[in-house]
Image (cartoon, rainbow, N blue to C red):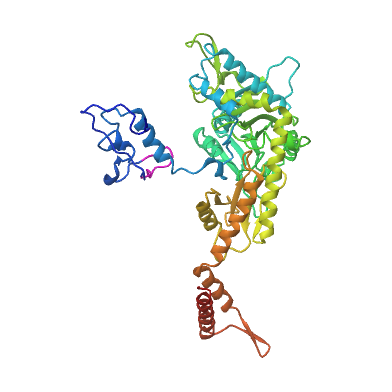
Amino acid sequence: MVHSFFLSVIKPPSSFSLPLASLIPSLSSSKMVLSKTASTSDVSIHSTFASRYVCSSLPRFKMPENSIPKEAAYQIINDELMLDGNPRLNLASFVTTWMEPECDKLMMEAINKNYVDMDEYPVTTELQNRCVNMIAHLFNAPLGASEAAVGVGTVGSSEAIMLAGLAFKRKWQNRRKAEGKPYDKPNIVTGANVQVCWEKFANYFEVELKEVKLREGYYVMDPVKAVEMVDENTICVAAILGSTLNGEFEDVKLLNDLLIEKNKQTGWDTPVHVDAASGGFIAPFLYPELEWDFRLPLVKSINVSGHKYGLVYAGIGWVIWRSKEDLPEELIFHINYLGADQPTFTLNFSKGSSQVIAQYYQLIRLGFEGYQNIMENCRGNALVLKEGLEKTGRFNIVSKDEGVPLVAFSLKDNSCYNEFKISEMLRRFGWIVPAYTMPADAQHIAVLRVVIREDFSRTLAERLVLDITKVLHELDTLPATLSTKVLNASEEKKVKNGTVVKKTEIETQREITDFWKKYVMQRKTNVC
């Protein structure tokens, strides 16, 4: 007997009247948190497959009155999700898109555990504490033989940065109050290349954000200019270990040394926070001699994203403090309504345990050797991609060899088309390669960026170069591109009797006409 997946479901009762849902779904015009409904002509979901279960449309923005079979619900959602991009080919993201099946299994087995229920899930809490201590030692925290590290798991580096910023603000306020000085105008110094979470922190928690502007050829914070901007109201200076824009590490050692001197001269005690969201799981393995972490005395806290080069799926970050004194006790809340006294310092409360368990799996599964091998492979694949792009002769490389394994590059000549057009055309091959402009004062520079993750192989790097070459060729042969090149060439000046003079309008028009005649005739002769 032949069984069909779509026909082998229980027939719905006769009173059941719900949807067809959509094989070609209309995507909602909303993108992030701020949502809006579509037009009145697009308020239902229709599906060819689901019509075997149901006979009318589902409302798109209201809960349906009746239930539908589980198979139909799955198929409706699965059909719409087919139009999402392929995560493995999403070269815009730093976030991990592949883990081993054993880790996937652990995550699914723990998906129903609430991370904050420490009394009910003590082993999960213990695994989080082990992760905090492993990462603290990786960052050279000055811990005694039996001393526990101070830190917490977060949803990501955004939450980690909020917590670290709050600690700096509260410590600064307490010190100013004790000195009898105003404490209502805190500020923080960063580069203009910081991730948007720093702007959120400044906005949400009423801290002035003082940004060091960038310049062409130098796309990270200048430590000298940063220290010049520090004043008595500065709660900390934030350095980035792995800029989102080009992967470059900022000079945390120089910043630390300059700030020590300024603190001596002024009597201030301005500290440093290191945003190591991308670079925190790279530098210890590829650049162990680089001083950026707790080896520097002014570095009081560090955040890192476990879901980036910590090699865990999205939803895990970490913030580590140098010592207990750097985290004000009044920021820690104690609760007992889950069964026992539990300290908590997070912006949210309930969340899943899966990512914490996955982080612990990666740390013990890979060890130092495993992480080092993966990071070296990523760096090698980044060099392959960089060399392939350089061989085209069409791009300037904006990224640095020392830093996050990524390749940021821009067109040498963008008079006919720009980086955004290349990004758009690469989508046809499945590649998601972002194009963006630099922040102030380098906003006239546009770049493309490819992030090299663990699952981006050398073969894929070589294939990407081939596809970029194809895109360049297609763009070069578009009539609009040819017209621009011909026009630019025709408007060039000529030499007459030893004097340089501009071509007349008639001469320019004749040259353009002659070019297109030759172009059309050549294409005619190529037709079989």
Q: Image quadrant of residue 106?
A: top right
Vertical placement of 166 versus 401: above or below? above
The spot of residue 18 in percent (x, y) is: 26, 33
**Which residue is painted at 68% across and 54% down in the image?**
388
The residue positioned farthest toward the right in the image shown: 289
Q: Image quadrant of residue 60?
A: top left
Vertical placement of 420 versus 129: above or below? below
> Observer-nearest residue: 79 or 35?
79
Q: How many marks?
A: 0
Q: Is residue 30 magenta?
A: yes
The residue stretch that appears in magenta: 26-35
Look at the image and tell me in which quarter the N terminus lies.
top left
The spot of residue 112 in percent (x, y) is: 48, 20
- 92 sits to left or right of 300: left
> Observer-nearest residue: 28 or 520?
520
> Observer-nearest residue: 45 or 489?
45
The spot of residue 129 in percent (x, y) is: 63, 19
Q: Image quadrant of residue 254?
A: top right
The residue positioned farthest toward the top in the image shown: 340
| Any part of residue 357 in sight | yes
The residue positioned farthest toward the bottom in the image shown: 497
The residue positioned farthest toward the front in the image shown: 1
The spot of residue 4 in percent (x, y) is: 36, 33
| Any part of residue 178 in sight | no
Q: Is residue 361 magenta?
A: no
Secondary structure mostly seen in magenta is: loop
